[in-house]
Amino acid sequence: MPWLIVSNDNENGPKIRADQAVMDAHWQYELANRDKILVAGSLREDDGVTKNGSVLLLNVATRTDAEAFFANDPATKAGMRGATEIRWLNVAILDTEEQP
């Protein structure tokens, strides 16, 4: 089942994003779980540069699985996440090509 997770960074977001060890661990976590991830990326300000959140589209069975995946992300564990919404998504179109 596809679960959409949209998360805004909290006030600690910029500091945590600047911590290369945390972000490397976050990236390795996503790569190690690529079989569950349909889409992953950072949300940004209108300047297209300043990161301020993230989006995940997971293919997992339950909301509990989606919540556990998100909770175990090193960036979440480091305290980067603010307001977060997890919703079941009825996918109509999905582009599966990797984007730069």
Image: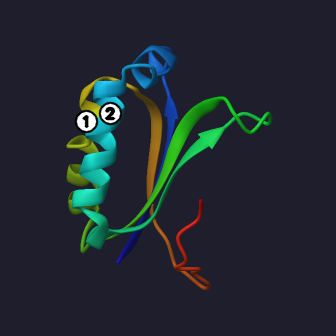
x and y percentages locating residue 26 in the rendered image: 31, 41
**Horizontal and vertical percent for residue 10?**
48, 22
Above or below: residue 54 compared with residue 3: above
Which one is nearer the viewer's eye here, 8 or 87?
8
Q: Residue at x 22, y 59 (%)?
A: 32
**Which residue is depicted at the point 45% across and 14% down?**
15
For marks 1 and 2, give the CA distance: 4 Å
Q: Is 42 on the left-hand or right-hand side of 48? A: left
Q: Say above or below: 17 vs 74.
A: above
Q: Residue placed at 31% from the left, 54% from the top?
A: 30
Pinpoint residue 34: horizontal percent, then vertical percent. 30, 66
Q: Residues within 10 Å of mark 2 (few under 14, many from 20)?
A: many
Badge 1 vs badge 2, beta-carbon distance below 8 Å: yes
User: In which quadrant of the rendered view does residue 25 lie?
Assistant: top left
Q: Position of residue 1 (x, y in %)?
A: 34, 78
Q: Which residue is under mark 1?
A: 74
Q: Which residue is painted at 36% across and 33% down in the image?
A: 23
Q: Residues within 10 Å of mark 1 (few under 14, many from 20)?
A: many
According to the image, label 2 marks what residue? 75
